[in-house]
Each structure stands twice: as structure tokens, then as C-alpha cells.
Image (cartoon, rainbow, N blue to C red):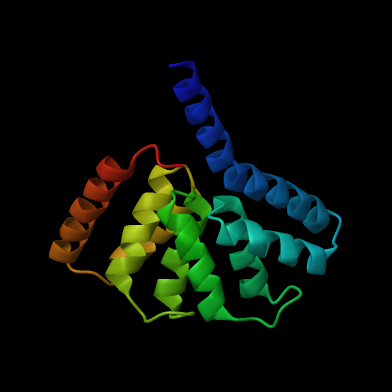
Amino acid sequence: MKSLRLLIASLLLILSFPVMNALAGYEEAKAAYDDRRFEEAFKGFTEAAEQGHMLAQYYLGVMYATGRTVPRDDVSAYKWFMKAALQGHPISQGNIGTMKLNARGTDYDVTGSYFWFILAEDGGFEKARKFMWRVTNYMTRDDINNTKAKAEEWIRENRGIN
């Protein structure tokens, strides 16, 4: 029994290494970003983002969207914002809404934009509310109601993911 506990504890420790590594990599990258050492930050964010770190994914999206250290690349920005958005990052969700509305890095999609603005606003990103109301000017009442229902379902199913 004692050896089983030791085995389980060892497995849990081994399985936690990637998470701890991603967190440490993110923290170092964020410090580099704040110190304007963008090449170092980009490398660290990339490593942490590839391991699933939500904030590293967001910052990679920012770096690609703004062309900081890397050539501006809306497709890559969209990719990294979407990864963070799917983990519940409200600012990334708002960025996805904006990118869909402006066809940056993805196709123009008003209802998709509205969907992501609803999620962003629900997550506490207050600026999303302003965009939600603007987008509804380009939607039918049925589109608005259907998109709200889909967003509410997504929120129920994914609450507490981040």
C-alpha cells in the first residue's frame, strides 16, 4: 500500500512538470516583455503557449497583431487569441470578436463576432458591451436570439475553465 502511494505521488509530480515549466516560462517572458526585451519575451511566450499557458497565448496574439518583434501576422494573431479565448480569456474573446468583425486573420462573420463579444462581456471585459450593441445593427432579430442562445450554452458548459 505504501509503495502504491509513493508511485501515485511520483506520477503526480512528474505530470506536474509541464505545468510548472509553462508557468515559469511565462513569468520569465512577462518580465522580459515588461522590460521591453521583446525577442526574449517572444521566445518564452512561444514555449509556454505551446504548452497551453493561456496568458502566454494572449501575449503571442498581441505580439503578432501589433508586429512587435515579429512581422505583423493577423492569421497567427487570430490563432493565438483563439487558443486563449477557448480557455476563457475575456480580452482574447473580445479580440476574436473584433477580428471577425473586421475580417482580420479570419473571414468576416457578424454573428461570430457577436458570439465572442457576449463571452468577453460575460467574462468581465466591459469594452465588449459597446461592440455588442454596434454589431446588432447588422443582424436580424433571429440572428441575435440564436447567437445569444449559443453563447449562453457555451458559457454554461465552460464556466470555470480558466
Q: Residue at x 56, y 56 (%)?
A: 51
Q: Is residue 126 left or right of residue 26?
A: left
Q: Closest to the observer: 152 or 71?
A: 71
Q: Measuring from the top left, give residue 3's x and y in whole percent.
A: 49, 22
Total numbered circles: 0
Q: Residue at x 45, y 54 (%)?
A: 128
Q: Closest to the observer: 83 or 111?
A: 83
**Rendered position, 145 above or below 39:** above
**Rendered position, 52 above or below 97:** above
* Residue found farthest to the top: 2
Q: Quadrant of residue 46?
A: bottom right
Q: Measuring from the top left, give residue 127's x and y in whole percent.
A: 50, 52
Q: Measuring from the top left, give residue 152's x and y in whole percent.
A: 24, 47
Q: Quadrant of the N terminus?
A: top left
Q: Closest to the observer: 77 or 97?
A: 77
Q: Measuring from the top left, give residue 20's x and y in whole percent.
A: 64, 42
